[in-house]
Image (cartoon, grey):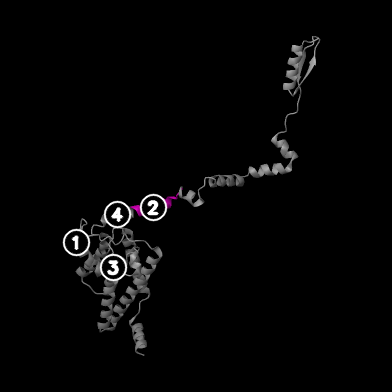
Amino acid sequence: MPSPKTKNSANRSAGGSAGLSGSTNGNGRYEFMSLNRTPPPTLLQRQGSDPTAAARLRASESPTRRRGSGSSTSSNTGMPEEDCMRLNPSFIGIALSSLLAIDLWLSKRLGVCACEDSSWGSIRPLMKLIEISGHGIPWLVGTAYGLYKADSAAGQEVMLNLFMALIIDLILVGIVKAVVRRRRPSHNRMDMFATFSVDRFSFPSGHATRAAMCARFLLAHLVLAAPLRVLVFLWSGLVGLSRVLLGRHNVTDVLFGFLMGYWQYNLVEMLWVSSLGLQGLLGLFQG
């Protein structure tokens, strides 16, 4: 008869090994052997037996699902999508931001006449005089007076088209300023001559557009000697430079203003009113 110790150890072995069966030999001891249990079905076998599970597995492994899981993972970070895009700016965005920073830095460095205690504050009155020479009101008043005093059809034609060019300049610059709405430099003092509502904005420089357009107009339609032509060219450049030295505008405001004024003259040439058109216009007013 097997001893109790042998029986207890056999019972513990049988109870702890669920997949084993025992048999006794001639000595009364248990001999254990493993049962050939069938292994669990693999994932592929499950796919064959369960079409719904297989379809779900294929959908989870599709590229679209993987992309969706990636976006859901990024959304789980708690940041909005636009903030995630800001963390990966494009090359164009980086270049524009760098140019803007250079523009602001250079404009502040060149604003040496922004106030009386600036490094070049002693020439601020001269710069303000150049500023007034490029203002729209003196040009409009002077052109209207020239049109009134002109005693020839050719002179009236030139003065009328110059007056029309000045009106076009005011309208276009006002529209661009109202759309862009770029603030003037922080070191600017708002002590400008005869300002209007849109003049609190900086882009583009109206003085620069007017100087470039009027310079082209005068050089094209007035017979001037060589020194006077050089003087007109220098005047237009000084007007643009004074805008930066006084701190009125950034450098890009003036550069774009020069380009815009150059193009505005082409528009004036397209809309040119001839002497015959002027006579017809005067006839309408007289009638």
Q: Please state which amino acid type lies under the numbered disc 4.
A: Leu
Q: Which residue is mark 3?
A: 211
Q: Please state which amino acid type lies under the numbered disc 2.
A: Ser
Horizontal side of residue 45 vs 255, given as left or right: right
Q: Nearer the viewer, mark 1 or mark 3?
A: 1
Camera-nearest residue between 55 and 116: 116
How far, Cα to Cα, is label 1 from label 2? 33 Å
Alpha-carbon neighbours of circle 1 within 10 Å: few (<14), some, or many (≥20)?
some
Horizontal side of residue 256 vs 41, given as left or right: left
Q: Are marks 2 and 3 in contact (CB under 8 Å)?
A: no
* Residue at x 75%, y 39% (from the top left corner): 49
| Residue 113 sits inside the magenta stretch | no
Q: Are marks 2 and 4 in contact (CB under 8 Å)?
A: no
Q: From where the camera sits, is residue 262 visible?
A: no
Camera-nearest residue between 246 and 54: 246
Q: In terms of sequence position, does the residue under pointer 2 or pointer 3 come before the other?
A: 2
How far, Cα to Cα, is label 2 from label 3? 29 Å
Q: In terms of sequence position, does the residue under pointer 1 or pointer 3 come before the other?
A: 1
**Disc 2 element:** helix
Q: In terms of sequence position, does the residue under pointer 4 or pointer 1 come before the other?
A: 4
Q: Which mark is residue 123?
A: 1
Where does residue 247 sit, x and y in percent of width and height? 27, 60
Q: In terms of sequence position, does the residue under pointer 1 or pointer 2 come before the other?
A: 2
How far, Cα to Cα, is label 4 from label 1? 20 Å
Q: Which residue is mark 4?
A: 106
How far, Cα to Cα, is label 4 from label 3? 22 Å
Q: Which residues are magenta?
A: 88-101
How far, Cα to Cα, is label 2 from label 4? 14 Å
Q: Please state which amino acid type lies under the numbered disc 1.
A: Ile
